[in-house]
Image (cartoon, rainbow, N blue to C red):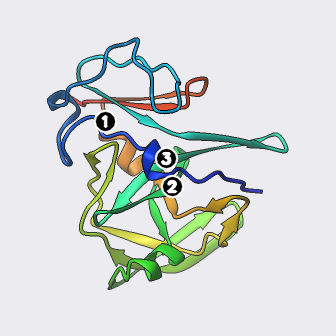
Amino acid sequence: MIGLLAVTAADCEVSGPPGARPSDTATESPTSKSAKGKKRTTKPGEVSVPVEVITTQGETMVLVPVRVNGRGPYDFVLDTGASSSTVSRSLMRRLRLPRTGSTAHVRGVTGATVVPMVTVERWTVGGQRLHGDSLPAVDLGGDFGAGQVSGLLGSDELRRFGAVRLDYKNERLVLRDAR
């Protein structure tokens, strides 16, 4: 069961200009508070991104605000177990993401299938540009609770950072520059 809580644009924080590397961004002091009043601690070279931690019936899901082609943010599930990030077919239709003509074989806990690949011109998390320019478009099943899952942010994108820290208590994802 996936339940979620939508992240609004007011909850998003960009610590620097779009496309800037974490080391190029000015971070807030370790005692600063986010818009939600949650304490965050970041160091130089780190970017702190607000997340929503959802726990329902003993299952926990972390939602990360991701901008796609300058729009959003959209709720992507943080999925370190996913080898490939994906977009939902719903988001593909909403943003009219063009198909590449290629397909991908995806496998999950419910089985395997072949899905279309779509082109994403630019996508970011916390103002940090993500690298993939073509992503599998999967059916994530539509609405879950208070919002809609628009994709999965997997280890293919997270591995480019030097470190990824999830602060469950303060609901923050901290990305450290790989340098």
x, y percent for residue 78: 53, 46
Give neighbour class at mark 1: few <14, some 14-19, many 20+ (Cα, 10 Å). Answer: some
Q: CA distance from mark 3 to mark 1?
A: 16 Å
Residue 175 placement: quadrant: top left
Q: Amino acid at mark 1?
A: Phe
Disc on the earlier residue, 3 or 2: 3
Give neighbour class at mark 2: few <14, some 14-19, many 20+ (Cα, 10 Å). Answer: many
x, y percent for residue 162: 30, 29
Q: Name the residue carrying label 1.
A: 161
**Relative to 156, is 104 above or below?**
below
Q: Secondary structure at mark 1?
A: loop
Give neighbour class at mark 3: few <14, some 14-19, many 20+ (Cα, 10 Å). Answer: many
Q: Amino acid at mark 3?
A: Val
Q: CA distance from mark 1 to mark 2?
A: 18 Å
x, y percent for residue 73: 42, 56
- Whether the residues at callouts 3 and 2 have beta carbons within 8 Å, the answer is yes
Q: Residue furthest right?
A: 57
**Relative to 21, is 4 above or below?**
below
Disc on the earlier residue, 1 or 2: 2
Q: Name the residue carrying label 3.
A: 64
Give the side of residue 66 with respect to residue 14, left or right.
right
x, y percent for residue 75: 52, 56
**Camera-nearest residue between 116 and 64:** 64
Q: Secondary structure at mark 3?
A: strand
Question: For residue 76, which numbered disc appears in the image?
Answer: 2
Q: Quadrant of the C terminus?
A: top left
**Relative to 173, is 115 above or below?**
below
Q: CA distance from mark 3 to mark 2?
A: 5 Å
Give the side of residue 114 with respect to residue 116, left or right.
right
